[in-house]
Amino acid sequence: MQAKYYTRFILRSGEPGYADEYSGIVEVSHAVDQVLEPQEIEAMLARNFQREEDDVELLNWSRIH
């Protein structure tokens, strides 16, 4: 099943001191009762942007009902 989340995160660039902040709706396929840890969310976002996990910093993540 798919669940929708409002998310806000920072994506660091390859250059020191540069980063972009993103916010919006993310749709995730997982069990309805499954709770995702922040590290799992950061890893998922990093894969979507084809970046390293250390490049992503999760600021906010909340399920939309």
Image: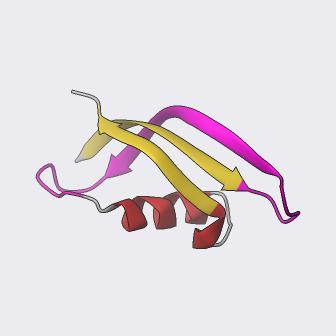
Q: What residue do we see at 17% from left, 56% from top?
A: 31
Q: Is residue 33 left or right of residue 38?
A: left
Q: Nearer the viewer, residue 21 or 26?
A: 21
Outermost residue toward the left?
33
| Residue 12: x %, y % from top left | 73, 57
Please tell me which residue is depicted at 37% across the width and 60% down the height of the picture.
38
Q: Residue drawn at (59%, 59%), measured in percent from left and top?
A: 56
Q: Which quadrant would residue 23 be assigned to in this image? A: top right
Residue found 55% across the figure and 56% down from its top? 57
Residue 22 vs 44, above or below: the answer is above
| Residue with the most extreme front position | 17
Q: Which one is nearer the viewer's eye here, 21 or 17?
A: 17
Residue 56 to residue 9: above or below = below
Q: Is residue 32 magenta?
A: yes
Question: Which picture quadrant has residue 21?
Answer: top right
Residue 61, compared with residue 64, is above or below; it is: below
Q: As drawn, is 62 to the left or to the right of 51?
A: left
Task: State the count of labels.
Answer: 0
Residue 52 in magenta stretch:
no
Nearest the eye: 16 or 51: 16
In screen coordinates, is 31 left or right of 20?
left
**How was this image coloured?**
secondary structure
User: Where residue 25 appears, x then y in whole percent?
Assistant: 46, 32
Name of the residue lying farthest toward the top? 65
Left or right: 24, with 34 as reference point? right
Q: Quadrant of the C terminus?
A: top left
| Residue stretch rendered in magenta on the structure | 12-35
Residue 36 screen position, x and y as percent: 27, 59
